[in-house]
Image: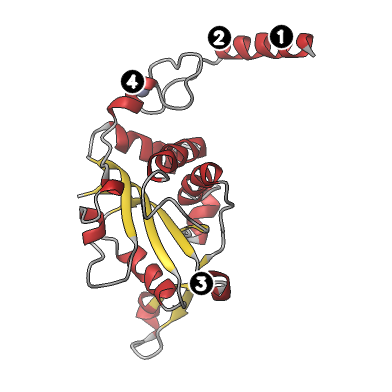
């Protein structure tokens, strides 16, 4: 077995010499033991700390609209900064591991504090089918997966589903028919969530309107408690 590990280490080292891994945020070489994001970026990326503040800007987005146990985002999102680079690569450069990594980072931070200490289900906001086909993955799922690994839970991939419907009431003529096709969400198995704690996750949170429409669905389920976590919050 020792020989096996030795050979594997040599192979790994050779691969990293031939194809050095770079930090997904700053493009510096990753050192041994660093994974996806370098230690310096990990320390300096703009964390919000919102999970420890009940009345934070993300939670306030939902006030008066839905019932929530708590809402948080791992980072602040500012244009031209490293979090934007990370989000761009996660979404457009086929880098799902960035989502996994940030999910794990986020979960390790929030799992220590209420209301995030106990979670029964982790559910990502589903992506448009067409977008998912092009991208090959849903970035919110990758984030959810990273969190789920820390929580020791599985991600309910299809807990929320997008459903298209055509609003026939407002259809005027065949030319603007496409404008009246709306996407709504539905909870696939509502009975699963009776009396459960559900963590809904998304990538970048701006107005929170998509999330709010999803949370409303869970608010209708008896005893279901909802929490929200996003990778980044864009003010
Ligand atoms: Zn870095």
Q: Secondary structure at mark 1?
A: helix
Quick one: SS at disc 2? helix
Number of the label disc, if any, that sits on residue 17: 2
Q: CA distance from mark 1 to mark 3?
A: 49 Å
The disc label shown at residue 187, or none: 3
Task: Check disc 3 and report its element: helix, strand or loop.
Answer: strand
Q: Residue furthest bottom?
A: 169
Are circles 3 and 4 on residues that touch, CB within 8 Å? no
Instruction: Using the image, tell me which numbered label, if any, was put on residue 40.
Output: 4
Q: Is mark 1 within 8 Å of ligand 1?
A: no
Q: Residue 59: image x %, image y %?
A: 26, 58
* Mark toward the start of the polypeptide (1 vs 3): 1
Answer left or right for 143 relative to 216: right
Q: Reading the chain from its start, which is encountered first: label 2 or label 3?
A: 2
Query: Does 203 sit above or below residue 99?
Result: below
- Residue at the image point whose x is 37% and y is 39% from the top: 88
Q: Residues within 10 Å of mark 2 (few under 14, many from 20)?
A: few
Cα–Cα gap, marks 4 and 1: 29 Å
Between marks 2 and 3 in the image, the one whose residue lies nearer the viewer: 3
Q: Quadrant of the N terminus?
A: top right
Q: Which residue is mark 1?
A: 6
């Amino acid at each position: 077995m020792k020989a096996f590990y030795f050979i594997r280490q040599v192979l790994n080292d050779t691969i990293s010499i031939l194809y050095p891994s770079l930090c997904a945020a700053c493009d510096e070489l990753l050192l041994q033991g660093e994974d996806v994001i370098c230690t310096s970026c990990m320390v300096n990326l703009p964390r919000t700390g919102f999970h420890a503040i009940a009345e934070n800007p993300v939670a306030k987005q939902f006030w008066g609209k839905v019932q929530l146990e708590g809402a948080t985002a791992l980072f602040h999102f500012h244009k031209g900064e490293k979090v934007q680079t990370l989000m761009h690569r996660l979404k457009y450069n086929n880098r799902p591991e960035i989502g996994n990594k940030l999910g794990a980072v986020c979960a390790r931070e929030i799992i220590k504090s209420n209301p995030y200490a106990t979670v029964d289900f982790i559910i990502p906001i589903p992506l448009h089918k067409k977008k998912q086909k092009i991208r090959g993955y849903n970035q919110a799922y990758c984030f959810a997966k990273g969190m789920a690994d820390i929580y020791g839970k599985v991600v309910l991939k299809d807990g929320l589903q997008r459903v298209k419907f055509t609003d026939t009431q407002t259809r005027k003529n065949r030319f603007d028919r496409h404008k009246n096709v709306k996407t709504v969400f539905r909870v696939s198995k509502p009975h699963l969530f009776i009396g459960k704690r559900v963590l809904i996750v998304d990538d970048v949170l701006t107005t929170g309107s998509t999330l709010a429409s999803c949370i409303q669905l869970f608010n209708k389920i008896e005893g279901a408690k909802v929490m929200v976590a996003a990778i980044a919050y864009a003010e």
